[in-house]
Image (cartoon, rainbow, N blue to C red):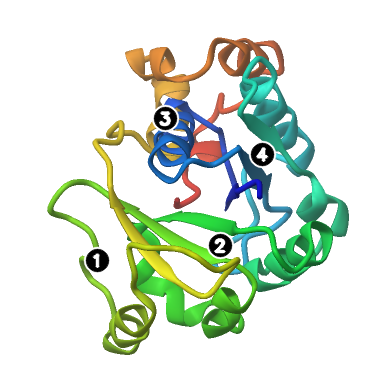
Amino acid sequence: MTRHGFIGGSFNPIHDGHIKAALETAKALALDSVTFIPAYQSPLKDAHSVSAEHRLAMVELAVADSPLLRCDDREISRQGRSFTVDTVRELRQDFGDDAPLFWIMGDDLLATLNQWSRWQSLVNYCHLVVLGRPGHVREDCPGEVADWLDSHATEIVSQPSGSVQFLELPLITMSSTSAREGFLMDRTTKLLLPTPVMEYIEAHALYRDRESTLETE
């Protein structure tokens, strides 16, 4: 039975930290693929500083040469606010009842997980994989989220969904915010972007003004 991972987010822009997280998680969990799913509009953010079409194009370029990585445009095609629980429900319908599915997220998102729509239903459709730097997993986690995570935590996955797993990975210390600021200030953070993404940003003159860098992660 094939095992599939998924990573959602604005990817504004996608950078090497995202790619490394996907590849390291695939190795740790023996995944057959990891798919990036760019959001049309993240519910807890203001309007994204770069259009959905540009962000999708950058993700497609970043994964084009990888046999393991994929891009899925379902949230952008759906438009409106992108709720993760709706996406994982669709993925479960697409892959059937038996395929193990893994939704991958950084531990920084745990601080606001209880603000996600129907967040406790996520594990009805997939396993939740929480990534963090060594020694830093689950910082600033609300009590109700911590209790819920503990009740579903396991290191052994024998079912298609239902568990929470924690992985400590030496991820690249970079954010999409720093990437945007790097283009504005012409800093060396450009070197931490996939080459096709960097070329796309330059060709389309993205992130060239202060306003385009102010969006929060």
Q: Secondary structure at mark 3?
A: helix
The x and y percentages for residue 57 are 74, 28
Residue sitting farthest toward the left: 135
Q: Amino acid at mark 2?
A: Lys
Spatial CA distance of label 2 from label 4 is 13 Å
Question: Count the marks: how many?
Answer: 4
**Callout 4: few (<14), some (14-19), or many (20+) C-alpha neighbours within 10 Å?**
some
Spatial CA distance of label 3 from label 4 is 23 Å
Spatial CA distance of label 3 from label 1 is 20 Å
**Lower position in the chain sequence, tag 2 or tag 3:** 3
Task: Give the residue pinned by disc 2.
Answer: 45
The x and y percentages for residue 138 are 24, 66
Horizontally, is 159 left or right of 2 in the view? Answer: left
Q: Are marks 1 and 4 in contact (CB under 8 Å)?
A: no
Single out the mark in the foreground, 1 or 2: 1
Residue under the image location 70 percent in, 19 percent down: 64
Task: Give the residue pinned by disc 1.
Answer: 138
Horizontally, is 47 left or right of 95 in the view? Answer: left
Look at the picture and state if 44 lies above or below 21.
below
Task: Give the residue pinned by disc 3.
Answer: 20
**Lower position in the chain sequence, tag 3 or tag 4:** 3
Task: Give the residue pinned by disc 4.
Answer: 50
The x and y percentages for residue 210 are 49, 35
Residue under the image location 66 percent in, 39 percent down: 50
Q: Are marks 3 and 1 in contact (CB under 8 Å)?
A: no
Q: Secondary structure at mark 1?
A: loop
